[in-house]
Image (spheres, grey):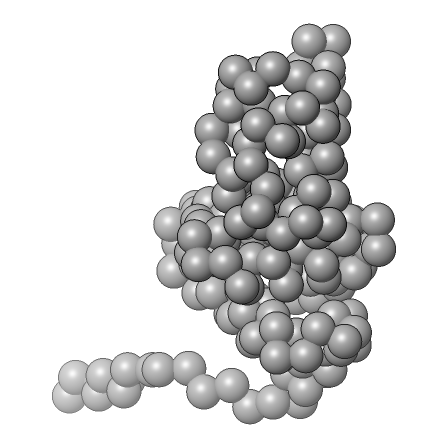
Amino acid sequence: MGLREMKAARTRRQIAEVAVSAFIEQGYDETTMEQIAEAAEIGTSTLYRYFPSKELLILEPFAEVLDFGRFLRARPTDEPVEEALAGALMDLADEFTDPSRRITEIRRIIDASAVPRARLWDFFLNSRADFEHALAERMSRQPTDHVVQITVGIALDIFYRVDEQWRGDHEKDYRVLFREALESLSTAEIVVPRMRAAKAKQ
């Protein structure tokens, strides 16, 4: 990353931090883009260049945390695929529960706001595509391969189910929920739809 890109990334992060603090302190609907620009000591046009809409500001902390592909690529290359997937999910849980990211507070705001809540699914969809590429690289397959896509689907379904549990009670430990889900699967008999084998020709 060049100097210009590093500076832009730093500015983007600073703007998001200012915005999140404002949303938490005075409310999402009550906070305007003009107030955020003033607090961040930048012009309104600069703010809109980085974040064209307010919901993108509240969702910014999730952009990195929900980067499933990044977590999978960071796992040891000699680690079995199933262990790498479990490790990637636990690594995600660690960042999700990092107090400095303020994810719990941000998620409460998103859950109470229709537009950001709907846009959050866009992040999931975009992240899934990269997750498929990361898994395909590790499995030496194509991202469109059924095995890759179904495996990613299972891993993401684990995340969705844990997230639903956590949304129901934000006081629950996200890492504990993930660990319980993964441990239960280690002894579960997963039923996969399967065609009946064709009879051998006489």
| Residue at the far right in the pictured view | 99
Residue at the (54%, 64%) spot, across then down: 112
In the rendered image, the vertical position of residue 108 relative to residue 41, given as above or below:
below
Total label count?
Answer: 0
**Visible in this render: residue 9?**
no
Residue drawn 54% across the image and 69% down it: 160
Query: Quick one: 57 or 145, which is closer to the camera?
Result: 57
**Residue 34 point in image, percent of width and height:** 57, 27
- Location of the C terminus by quadrant is bottom left
Q: Which image quadrant is residue 40 in?
A: top right
Residue 181 percent across, percent down from the top left: 67, 80
Q: Is residue 36 left or right of residue 56?
A: right
Residue 107 at x, y = what percent?
63, 60
17 left or right of 107? right
Asked if one can make out residue 201 in the rendered structure from this viewpoint, the answer is yes
Above or below: residue 63 compared with residue 195? above
Residue that appears at 55% across and 32% down: 33
Closest to the observer, 150 or 71: 71
Query: Residue at the spot x=49%, y=52% of the render?
Result: 116
Residue 153 percent coordinates (x, y): 47, 65
